[in-house]
Image (cartoon, grey):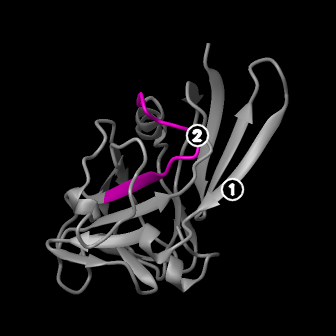
Amino acid sequence: MKKKYLSVFLAGVFIVILGGMSSAVTYNEEKGVISGLDDVLAYGTSYFDSGTTLYLGREFNFNEPTITGFRFQNVAIPENVVIESAKIKLMGTWAGDNGVKLKISADDSDNSATFSSSNTPVNRIKTTNQVDWNTGDFMEDAFIESPDIKTTVQEIIDRVNWENGNSVSILISNDGSTDWSAKEIYSFESGFANAA
């Protein structure tokens, strides 16, 4: 029987709580984006892995639909567990009164590779399990939390070759946001406290 596993992406830190099926013992691990190559932006043929901000929805300057990728390295989720909850929190850089329509998926691989100009979020095969996220308003310098993405994370953990310590990349794609609808968030380069 699988153990229950609670995992939460929280404020740029991957927090894992493992509870025994019949005990109150818990174990915590915090993982976050640890490199500028771990949170990136792609749209069309453009790719960015530096700068202090990223966009969700449509790229603000050129109005292009985006895919933003967040790679969490050395994720300590054992094989054969049940994910009870998984979310991602991001910090917005400015207040906005329009929401964006997004789709959250993961890189459908056993051990997600580092992003690069030849292996961008656009090039990744996405998980079958994807979650809609209609963000609503953002507040300046405040966190916004995604819907639960446990089915997306579970699909990765259930892969035959998943191993404790592998990397997971979460992909957030535009999913019908209208022209110029964008949310700007802080990246790793802005400082770890704000990063995804």
Q: Percent position (x, y) of residue 25?
A: 84, 32
Indicate the amino acid at tag 2.
Answer: Asn
Front of the two marks 2 and 1: 2
On the rendered structure, is 56 left or right of 71?
left
Indicate the amino acid at tag 1.
Answer: Glu
Quadrant holding the N terminus: top right
Q: Is 177 in the magenta?
A: no
Identified at 52% across, 55% down, the residue is 88
Question: Residue beneath label 2, please?
Answer: 164
Identified at 49% across, 38% down, the residue is 150
> What kind of secondary structure does the magenta stretch mostly adopt?
loop
Q: Percent position (x, y) of residue 74?
A: 57, 53
Magenta residues (range): 159-172
Identified at 22% across, 61% down, the residue is 122
Disc 1, SS: strand
Question: Label 2 neighbourhood size at 10 Å, few (<14), some (14-19), many (20+)?
Answer: some
Examine the image and state in which quarter residue 135 appears: bottom left
Q: Which mark is residue 14?
A: none
Examine the image and state in which quarter residue 85 appears: top right
Question: Residue beneath label 1, please?
Answer: 30
Give the CA distance from mark 2 to mark 1. 14 Å
Q: Nearer the viewer, residue 44 or 37?
A: 37
